[in-house]
Amino acid sequence: MIKREWYLFIFILLFVLSLAFSISITMDVFKVGSLNVNGARETQKRALVFEMAKMKHIDVLFLQETHSDAGIEADWSREWEGEVILSHNTTLSGGVGYLFSRGFTPTSLEVRHVVEGRCLLVRAHFEHFNVVFINIYAPNNGTERKHFFEKLNDILNSCDQEDYLFIGGDFNCTENEILDRNHAEPHPVSQHTLRQLVSLMTWWTCGEGCMQAADNTHGPTLEKTESLWPDLIVFMSLSTE
């Protein structure tokens, strides 16, 4: 029997997130969502995640804390009707991945395990443009998190400015504790590094990348969305049509 609490929790999260992450690219429309599953080694819990993703018509679902390993990777692929890409940490912590729906059909996918079990980059190739998805599960330790954000900064700097960029996940840190916490951020050093990262992402979406996209008839214009969830930062692409 699937626990009722799981069902309600995941339903509410996906309902909120799927409202925020609709995008349109030329004639194709797909939804992007993000969910920390807090462990998904049990078949029943994975089934619930799959059911909710299909119910909300989510085409690209970012997952954090999958607690997956090579031993159950085949189970994920067998149970989900689309494509599954996982990056493992341990069976007790970490792990990130994507669920791509059967209807999400780029011509090809490039996969890069930036940090095993914590940062997974996928570049989806379409006929006239590319979309980059970066899924984040930042470390809980403040010093490790700072170094992790610095590495992510390097990754962003290496991305092609012609690509459309989606970053989502669990950052385990807040940019603005007044909005997202009822107390000060416990590790201000990693918060400072996160703010530098956000500045870079803001430039990406509102700087040259935005101007280039506005002149591109084959792809969407880039816009920045506000943070919808503590520890969740999402930048998304929206069509001008």
Image (tube, helix red, strand yellow):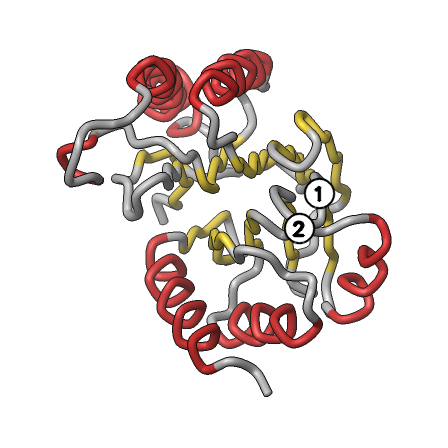
Whether residue 207 can be seen here: no
Q: Report the residue at 63% width, 61% height from top.
A: 40
Q: Given the image, on which type of amino acid does mark 2 rest?
A: His
The residue tagged with tag 1: helix, strand or loop?
loop
Residue 71 in the image, given as x and y percentages of width and height: 86, 54
Give the residue at mark 1: 90
Instruction: For the N terminus, give its image quadrant.
Output: bottom right
Q: Residue furthest bottom?
A: 1
Q: Characterize the local packing of mark 2: few (<14), some (14-19) or many (20 or more) Cα atoms within 10 angstroms.
A: many
> Nearest the camera: 185 or 60?
185
| In this rendering, position of residue 148 left or right of residue 77 | left
Give the residue at mark 2: 67
- Compared with 75, 150 (above or below) is above
Residue 191 figure quarter: top left
Q: Characterize the local packing of mark 1: few (<14), some (14-19) or many (20 or more) Cα atoms within 10 angstroms.
A: some
Residue 110 in the image, given as x and y percentages of width and height: 75, 35
Asked if the residue under mark 2 is in contact with the one under mark 1, i.e. CB atoms within 8 Å, the reply is yes
Residue 210 in the image, given as x and y percentages of width and height: 37, 25
